[in-house]
Amino acid sequence: MTSIRIGIVGKTNTGKTTFFNAATLLDAEVQPYPFTTKEPNIGVAHVSSPCVCGEFNVDDDPRNSLCINKMRFYPITLIDLPGLIKGAHQGKGLGNQFLTVAAQSDALLHVVDASGSIDAEGNIVEPGYGDPLSDYYDIEEELVLWYHKIIEGNRTTIEKYEKTLGLVEALYTVLSGIKVGSTHIEKALKLTGLIDKPFKDWTMEETRNFAYVIRDVSKPTVVVANKIDLDEAEKNYLRL
């Protein structure tokens, strides 16, 4: 078992499953059309770093990882998620399933087709026709709107618990299920200037801003520029 879960997210047909297969040495289905992945694929990859056994000149026998030639390999659970389209937070495509699993990850790898060879619906087109920057922002927007939907949908619960538990713990009661901790919430409240403002007085804009910051704080994300060898990719990479 591994303790860290990283979700592979992105628009449909950007190469998420190909990346997943390369990282885990598994053979999940890959096809050149949208929504091939309908259920999350789960596998284990490894992160490597020099092992201290070399520094101390001792033999190593770790229980939670592998040590090979003085290099430590730490297991990480990778989750290849169904592709996302605009409107996923409203249930379009496989949106609800995608967002629920994505939100339960500790961090995200956002795979983008840097060549611009998919259109708005995830269909394959000539490189340069699509816009990877728009694709990136569309996915990020869906994640933020998902957080916003959870917060707004539990407004009564948050207001109730705030009276006895305080604002941080009240928000934690509805966000803990998607791996948002109290420290994440406190940091986001401070960054948005809402730490001392009662939840019932938050405006829609303030709630949306908090959703944006709490998503960023609780789910560190690395952008993976895929298909970098195709035409137009280098130019788009610089934009990303």
Image (cartoon, helix red, strand yellow):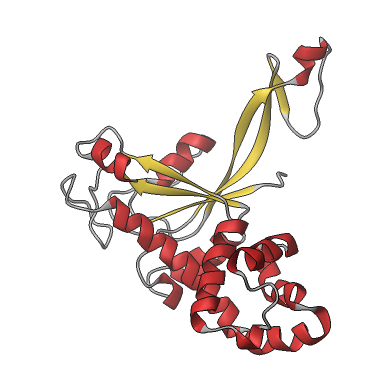
Q: Please state which of residues 186 and 85 is positioned toward the viewer in this rendering.
A: 186
Q: Residue at x 31, y 53 (%)?
A: 133
Residue 142 placement: quadrant: bottom left
User: Does residue 113 appear to the left or right of 232 in the view shown?
Assistant: right
Q: Residue at x 30, y 45 (%)?
A: 239
- Residue 84 position in % (x across, y down): 40, 62
Residue 155 placement: quadrant: bottom right
Q: Decide if residue 29 is in sight here.
A: no
Q: Please state which of residues 147 and 26 is positioned toward the viewer in this rendering.
A: 147
Q: Please state which of residues 188 and 54 is positioned toward the viewer in this rendering.
A: 188
User: Does residue 178 appear to the left or right of 163 in the view shown?
Assistant: left
Image height check: is 27 above or below 38? above
Q: Residue at x 51, y 56 (%)?
A: 40
- Residue 9 position in % (x across, y down): 46, 54
Placement of the N terminus among the 4 image quadrants: top right
- Residue 163 position in % (x across, y down): 79, 87
Q: Residue at x 71, y 26 (%)?
A: 66
- Residue 232 position in % (x across, y down): 20, 39
- Of all residues, the one furthest to the top in this rendering is 57
Image height check: is 7 above or below 97? above
